[in-house]
Amino acid sequence: MDLSKPRVMGIINPTPDSFFKGSRLTDPSHAVVIAREMHLQGADLVDVGAVSSRPGAEEVSEQEEMDRLFPVLEALKNELPDCPISVDTWRSGVARAVHQQFGVNMINDISAGQLDPDMFSTIAELGVPYVMMHMQGTPDQMQDAPKYKNVVDELLQFFGQKVHKLRKLGVNDIIIDPGFGFGKTIEQNYRLLEELDSFRMLELPLMVGISRKSMIYKPLELDPSEALNGTTASHMAALLKGASLLRVHDVKAAVETVKIFQQIVNSRYHGI
């Protein structure tokens, strides 16, 4: 996938407890309907995750994760064979299984290998693109008073070390995700958004997942279901700061935001 221009990733969650009810798609046929709609609206790929990572989420076994994933992945592959699929998992065993059985195109790991020490070597063996996200702590306690001396500097150091390890293993297709809402206060999230362009020094594509999150709906005193306007505003800010990939619930709105962003960028090159 060419990331020289921003791309959009639609969210499909075969889970009963994801924080945004609109992304809970446990029925494979329903997941196909939504994924097809996302594809038609301009999504470049869909991200399927079977374990909720919302703060305080209950732990799910590896077998349960695969039991949720496999029917949806099979339906998507059968009904939408041309739609690239990413799987959101931190388990190397799940990553291996979904790649071998369904030819999944990308692995999206919320822990950057922190929760499974075999993940990096597995990604190197599979040869698939890898999204690694920063998370302070684990989902069950990550929002219990997260602390940083300097959130941007610490994340840059974290990613620098992780990229070095992956490069030594021969992994080249790496995307980084600052992990908005994963072990960060609202203030820390906005500091990251304001200084997102600092991550350009890593010379890697940058994914941003802020869709309908608490950093948006809490300051606006809204529910996640009402947070589309705030999400769109935040997406534009992220694009202007260098985001390459938006992970979103609302594909149509995100695709339109990217198109307006491209108009802004094109005006620079045409001297308008």
Image (tube, rainbow, N blue to C red):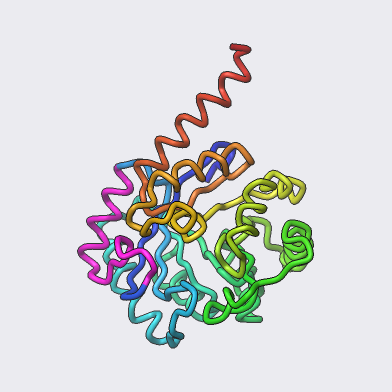
In magenta, the rendered stretch is 18-40
Residue 160 in view: no
Q: Position of residue 116 (x, y in %)?
A: 61, 81
At horizontal 37% and vertical 85% (from top left) the residue drawn is 64
Instruction: Give 150 or 95, whichever is nearer the viewer.
Output: 150
Magenta segment, prevailing SS (helix, strand or loop):
helix
> Left or right of 220: which side holds 202?
right
Question: Which residue reaches farthest top?
Answer: 272
Query: Taking 51 as reference, is 173 above or below it?
Result: above
At horizontal 29% and vertical 73% (from top left) the residue drawn is 71
Indicate yes or no whether the magenta region holds residue 261.
no
Q: Quadrant of the C terminus?
A: top right
At horizontal 26% and vertical 55% (from top left) the residue drawn is 34
Instruction: Give 4 or 59, whichever is nearer the viewer.
Output: 59
Question: Which residue reaches farthest front?
Answer: 221
Residue 202 in view: yes
Instruction: Give 219 or 31, whichever is nearer the viewer.
Output: 219
At horizontal 51% and vertical 45% (from top left) the residue drawn is 234
